[in-house]
């Protein structure tokens, strides 16, 4: 499928600069990757919205203090470090 896209001069310059720097082999490759990222981001947003809706519909919630959030974060960072260390 062929699609023709017209870019503003600023976007065209940005695309050409990325190709010139070797970040992408061609402008087509850059656009393909940008569209893939857009689709992935859209799916991630939809998933997150679904989780938020599910949480909102699940009933009562527990309000956590800043200290409790800090503790949860420390535990998560520790666990991630253990998993990386293998």
Image: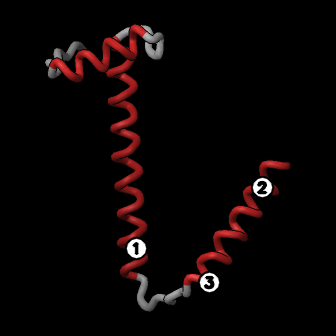
Q: Nearer the viewer, mark 1 or mark 2?
A: 2
Sequence order check: which comes first, mark 3 or mark 1? 1
Q: Image check: 10 left or right of 58?
A: left
Disc tally is: 3
The residue indicated by pointer 3 is 67
Q: Position of residue 15 (x, y in %)?
A: 31, 17
Q: Nearer the viewer, mark 3 or mark 1?
A: 3
The residue indicated by pointer 1 is 54
- Residue in the image at 26% along x and 16% along y: 13
Label 3 to label 1: alpha-carbon separation: 26 Å
- Residue in the image at 40% along x and 25% along y: 33
For the residues bearing labels 3 and 1, Cβ distance under 8 angstroms: no
- Residue in the image at 35% along x and 72% along y: 53
Name the secondary structure under disc 1: helix
Q: Nearer the viewer, residue 35 or 75?
A: 75
Q: Position of residue 80 (x, y in %)?
A: 73, 57
For the residues bearing labels 1 and 2, Cβ distance under 8 angstroms: no
Q: Quadrant of the N terminus?
A: top left
Q: Image check: 19 left or right of 64?
A: left
Q: Quadrant of residue 48?
A: bottom left
Mark 3 burial class by Cα count in 10 Å: few <14, some 14-19, many 20+: few
**Residue 4 in the image: above or below residue 48:** above
Mark 2 burial class by Cα count in 10 Å: few <14, some 14-19, many 20+: few
Q: Nearer the viewer, residue 75 or 70?
A: 70
Name the secondary structure under disc 2: helix
Q: Nearer the viewer, mark 3 or mark 2?
A: 3
Label 3 to label 2: alpha-carbon separation: 21 Å
Q: Quadrant of residue 12?
A: top left
The residue indicated by pointer 2 is 81
- Residue in the image at 70% along x and 69% along y: 74
Q: Nearer the viewer, residue 71 or 40?
A: 71
Farthest right residue?
86
């Amino acid at each position: 499928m062929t699609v023709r896209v017209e870019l503003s001069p600023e976007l065209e310059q940005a695309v050409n600069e990325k190709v010139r720097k070797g970040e992408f082999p061609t402008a087509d490759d850059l656009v393909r990757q940008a569209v893939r990222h857009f689709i992935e981001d859209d799916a991630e947003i939809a998933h997150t919205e679904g989780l938020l809706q599910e949480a909102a519909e699940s009933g009562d919630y527990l309000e956590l203090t800043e200290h409790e959030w800090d503790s949860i974060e420390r535990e998560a960072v520790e666990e991630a470090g253990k998993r990386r260390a293998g």
